Image: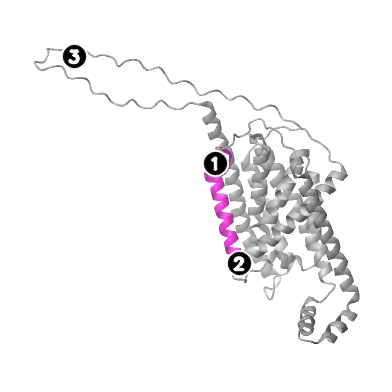
C-alpha cells in the first residue's frame, strides 16, 4: 500500500532587494544652517508569504477543527446523557441502584445517534483523501489480535496502579463494575453497538481526515483521542494502546471490518466472557475461606473447594489460557515490532513540526482539557 510521493513545497522566496534610500530635495528657500541628514526609520517587515508556513497554518486549522468537533461531541454527549439517564431512572421508580440498561441506553443513545454524527459533520470532508483498500489474511488478523492482549494487559495494570495512587486507594472502575452485571445489555452495547460506532469515528473518520499529514501522526492521534474519550484513568492507557493497533490495522487495509472485529472480540472477553467466568465462583466467600486458611483453618478451604470444583476448574482453565495468549502476544510483539510498515503520505508533516501542528491549536487544547478534567472528576467521585 503506497501513497504518492511527498510534494516538493516551494522554497522560501528570497528577500526583496534593498537599494539605497531615495534622496529628497527640500523645496523652498535654503536654510542658513547646514543640511541635516534625513532620519532613518525602520522599514516595516515584509509579510511572510512562504507557502510552506501557509501550509503548516492550514494543517493547524484542520487539526483545530477536528479537536473542536471532538470537544463539542463530549459536551453534547454529557449534557444529553445526564438528562436522559435522569428521565429513565425516574421512569423506573427512582429507587435503589440504577439498572445497567438505564446506564447503557441513557449514555449510548445520545452518544451514538446525536453527538458522534454532529462531530463528524463538523469535521467536514476537505482533508479526506482516497486510498486503496486491501484484504487481510486470517493468519495476520489473529497474529495482530494476539498482540493486542499484552498491550491491553500492560495498559490495564498501569492504569489501575496509577488510579490507586492518585486516589489513595479509594477509586473504583465503574465501567468494570457495570460489565460485571452479566446480561444481554452487555452484549448489545459492549460487544456490538459500541465497537461499530467507536471504530467508525476514531478509525475511519479521524484517520481518513488526518492521514494525508502522515500515517504515524494519524494513528497516534486516533489512539490518543480514543483513550481520552473514555474519560477513565483505569481505561486510558489500554484504550490508547489498543487504539494504536486498531489504527494501524485500519491504515494498512482502509477497511473498517478488521479493527471492528478485533474491538468486538476484546470487548466480548472483557464484558461477557470474563464476568461469566468470575460468577462461577462466589468471590466474597472465596475471600473469607482464604482468610480462614491463612489463620490455620485449612479444613474450611478444603470443604469450600470440594463444593465448588466445577467453578474453580472453569476459572483455572480460563486464566491459564489467558496467561498463555498474553505470553504469546508478547513474543509476537517483540519479534514483529520492527516489521510494522508505514508509508509516506501526500503531505507528510516534517519532523519537529508534528506535535505543535497537531496539538498546538485551540480545538485540540480544548478537547484535551475537557476530557482530562472529566477524567479527574470521574476518578475522585
Q: Earlier in the sequence, mark 3 or mark 2?
A: 3
Q: Secondary structure at mark 2?
A: helix
Disc 1 target residue: 356
Label 3, label 1: how many angstroms apart (C-alpha)?
53 Å
Observer-nearest of 370 and 344: 344
Label 2, label 1: how many angstroms apart (C-alpha)?
31 Å
Observer-nearest of 335 and 287: 335
In the picture provided, is 381 more to the left or to the right than 259? left
Residue 26: mark: 3
Asked if residue 33 is among those painted magenta in the image, a careful observer would answer: no
Asked if residue 375 is among those painted magenta in the image, a careful observer would answer: yes
Range drawn in magenta: 353-381
Observer-nearest of 322 and 211: 322
**Location of the C terminus (image quadrant):** bottom right
Residue 165: mark: 2
Q: Secondary structure at mark 3?
A: loop
In the picture provided, is 91 more to the left or to the right than 71? right
Amino acid at each position: 500500500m503506497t501513497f504518492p510521493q511527498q510534494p516538493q513545497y516551494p522554497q522560501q522566496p528570497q528577500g526583496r532587494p534593498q537599494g539605497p534610500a531615495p534622496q529628497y530635495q527640500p523645496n523652498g528657500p535654503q536654510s542658513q544652517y547646514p543640511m541635516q541628514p534625513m532620519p532613518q526609520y525602520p522599514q516595516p517587515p515584509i509579510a511572510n508569504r512562504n507557502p510552506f508556513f501557509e501550509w503548516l497554518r492550514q494543517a493547524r486549522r484542520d487539526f483545530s477543527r477536528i479537536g473542536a468537533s471532538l470537544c463539542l461531541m463530549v459536551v453534547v454527549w454529557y449534557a444529553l446523557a445526564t438528562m436522559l439517564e435522569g428521565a429513565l431512572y425516574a421512569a423506573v421508580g427512582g429507587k435503589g441502584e440504577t439498572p445497567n440498561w438505564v446506564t447503557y441506553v441513557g449514555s449510548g443513545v445520545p452518544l451514538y445517534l446525536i453527538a458522534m454524527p454532529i462531530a463528524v459533520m463538523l469535521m467536514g470532508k476537505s482533508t479526506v483523501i482516497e486510498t486503496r483498500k486491501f484484504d487481510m489474511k486470517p493468519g495476520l488478523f489473529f497474529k495482530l489480535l494476539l498482540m493486542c492482549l499484552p498491550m491491553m494487559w500492560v495498559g490495564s495494570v498501569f492504569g489501575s496502579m496509577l488510579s490507586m495512587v492518585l486516589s489513595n486507594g479509594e477509586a473504583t472502575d465503574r465501567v468494570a463494575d457495570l460489565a460485571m452485571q452479566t446480561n444481554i445489555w452487555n452484549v448489545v452495547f459492549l460487544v456490538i453497538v459500541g465497537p461499530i460506532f467507536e471504530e467508525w469515528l476514531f478509525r475511519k473518520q479521524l484517520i481518513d481526515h488526518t492521514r494525508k499529514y502522515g500515517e504515524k501522526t494519524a494513528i497516534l492521534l486516533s489512539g490518543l483521542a480514543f483513550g481520552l474519550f473514555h474519560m477513565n484513568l483505569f481505561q486510558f492507557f489500554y484504550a490508547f494502546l489498543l487504539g494504536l493497533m486498531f489504527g494501524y490495522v485500519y491504515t494498512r487495509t482502509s477497511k473498517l471490518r478488521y479493527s471492528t472485529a478485533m474491538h468486538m472480540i476484546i470487548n466480548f472477553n472483557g464484558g461477557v466472557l470474563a464476568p461469566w467466568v468470575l460468577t462461577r465462583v462466589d468471590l466474597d466467600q472465596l475471600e473469607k475461606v482464604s482468610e480462614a486458611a491463612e489463620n490455620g483453618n485449612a479444613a474450611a478451604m478444603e470443604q469450600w473447594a470440594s463444593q465448588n470444583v466445577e467453578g474453580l476448574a472453569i476459572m483455572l482453565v480460563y486464566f491459564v489460557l489467558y496467561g498463555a495468549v498474553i505470553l504469546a502476544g508478547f513474543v509476537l510483539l517483540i519479534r514483529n515490532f520492527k516489521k510494522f510498515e508505514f508509508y509516506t503520505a501526500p503531505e507528510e508533516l516534517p519532523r519537529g513540526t508534528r506535535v505543535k501542528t497537531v496539538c498546538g491549536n485551540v480545538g485540540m487544547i480544548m478537547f484535551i482539557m475537557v476530557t482530562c478534567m472529566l477524567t479527574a472528576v470521574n476518578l475522585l467521585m
